[in-house]
Amino acid sequence: MSKPEAQRQRPRLAVFKFASCDGCQLSILNLEEDLLAVGQALDLAYFPEASSDMKAGPYDIALVEGSITTAEDAHRILAVRQQTKVLITIGACATAGGIQALRNWADVEAFKQAVYPSPEYIQSLSTSTPISEHVHVDYELWGCPIDKHQLLRVITDLVVGVQPRLPGDSVCLECKRRGNVCVLVAKGIPCLGPVTRTGCGAICPGMGRDCYGCFGPSEGERKGPGLPPNTASLATRFHRELQLIPAEVVRRFRGINGYVSPFRAESETWGNKA
Amino acid sequence: MVTASETNAVLPTADLQRLLDALSAKGYRVIGPMVREGSVVWETIRRVPDLPIGRRDQQEPGRYRVEQTGSSEIFGVVHGPQSLKPFVFAPREPLLQIERSKDGFTTSPILPEPDKVAIIGARACDLAGLAIQDRIFLNDTYRDPYYAARREGLFVIAVNCTRSLQTCFCASMDTGPRAKTGFDLALTEVDDRFLIEAGSEAGRDLLSGLSLPPASEDLAGEATRRIEACARNQVRQLDCSRLPHALYEAHEHPRWDEVAGRCLACTNCTMVCPTCFCHTVEETPDLSHQHSAHPRLWDSCFTQQHGYIHGKNIRPTIKDRYRMWLTHKLASWIDQFGTSGCVGCGRCITWCPVGIDLTEELPALLAPGVQPSIASQQMDNA
């Protein structure tokens, strides 16, 4: 039974940004009519995107957006972890390294030389890595951007003290529940839905487009109770029946979540064939 | 006494609108096949041109295409991904509304209040699937009120198949291509005429209201010849004569590893299957924690969560899940419900993104396999 409002200490929420586009943070503000309820249930202690009143830690819940791409950020994330009870990554950058993790297969020094007139001022690591490579992460919200309803659901569960439910099912399950026609079977386009995690509402196939995997691999990236998705079988289908050449198969898997292990391993397998 | 004129009749295809209008006049929302996004899906049909006239579907493992034929054929498309399942077993529906009270909580069921729906274009395999779902959901002991509410008023107009897809095998499952029971009206399209047969009191009632001439013996005979030819043309079949036991004995067959290497565990086969009935329920509280809805959603034995049971996942690998699905569908379903769980519609073959074909898998699994080596058994147990 919940305590009356006055007696209850509202959990303190903080939102931190690393290398990212701010789109996932905006999903919080995009909660619109639910935003007032969030403000009542939680103390928005640190959220620079929303308020210049930035209170010091510790925090009960930290939402972390963005990947680690600088030495400074690699230190800063340690400090965030130290003052946070429950750390949740929000979005593909924080959870998987993001689109900027394409640099992990490239020469960042060469990019700097080509782009900037004074490259010596650019302090950047040679890699973009997910938060989980640096500190312990309690929950991961996938997506580019995240789904605001899923975020609200996780916050709701944490406020009341139950384990958040984050389904790892494939996008296909949601497509079929919604009555979407399968774009892979009916149009022959290389949809990543069968190996991608649901949570987005199957938006792209619902608009007749192929899923490009922005919610990351279904069932997770590590061998756990489930297995990583069978990307090898889908990639073989793309190549043999849908006539993608190996370089195109690489590009399919090396997208927004390209650095996460099942997708990374698949793209590297096909990179060796290209 | 029921006379021939009350149970069958002839309707020129040009007059099909009369049937749609008669259904509308009785308060039905008419649902039929409509082309959308490269397939046919069930949509509300108001006029005959809404139907996929002059189109045919080509289906093969992992591939579906709708083609123009230029003919005036109305029901040339056999089927799309959806069976009748979504109309009776909803993909997502609220079951309960839960409200916090002073000393606990209260629950109130939310029973659906469905439209009066008439479906035109159901195939024999769809009806067979519906009959199996009826057994599951309307079982006397565990009657599902949500399913029952949707099922009760459903008016079904079957279309007998006169054309088989490459993926069809209803003839070998004895479920088609002629609709035998479970329909209110059945149409057989014979060039520019429909043979209409009534299969229920409601169907006879509607038919007599149309005041159509009785069908000639020639028309009935030609309809039968075309349906029989359709059965003969089926290139796939499933020999279930050794089931269920032969599949239980194949539990350690090496073929399971082979098919698991291809299977994506994406759930498509179970979603399009007319008989698969797995579901999950969720709790969806709001932030105030005073209210929660309790919806039921389609689920699948191919998901990770489905095999999770008090601290352990009993089906961690794709092999476990494919074996569970196929063994249940073709074998233990017989023990459980007294019928196969497969109606031979072929949807699981077409809509599998990698084209896994159960009519290939079953014979391979029932053929003598190489005994798995001790090394691979140890890997399984690891």
Image: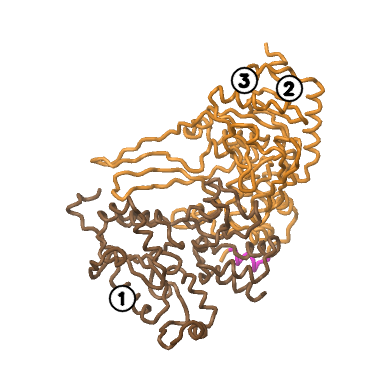
Chain colours: A brown, B orange
Give the residues drawn in magenta, as a range. B373-380
Judge from the rendering whether residue A273 lies leftward or rightward of residue A1; answer left or right: right
Q: Nearer the viewer, mark 3 or mark 1?
A: 3
Question: Compared to B267, does A16 lie above or below?
Answer: below
Report in which chain the residue with disc 1 lies. A
Q: Position of residue A66 (x, y in %)?
A: 40, 70
Q: Residue at x 36, y 39 (%)?
A: B97
Q: Report whether B331 appears left or right of B290.
A: right
Q: Quadrant of the N terminus of chain B?
A: top right
Q: Residue furthest top?
A: B1
Marks 3 and 1 in Cβ contact (< 8 Å): no
Quadrant of the frame with the C terminus of chain B: bottom right
Q: Amino acid at mark 1?
A: Ala
Viewer-nearest of discs 1 and 2: 2
B355 up-or-down from A233: above or below = above
Place residue B227 in its image quadrant.
top right
SS of the residue at dot 2?
strand
Are labels 1 and 2 assigned to the same chain? no
- Residue B206 is marked as 3
User: Mark 2 Cα within 10 Å, few/some/many (few <14, many 20+)?
Assistant: many
- Above or below B106: residue A147: below
Left or right relative to B33: residue B73 = right
Q: Quadrant of residue A46?
A: bottom left
Check disc 1 and report its element: helix, strand or loop: helix
Q: Percent x, y for residue B117? A: 55, 30
Please name the residue that numbered disc 2 is placed on: B10
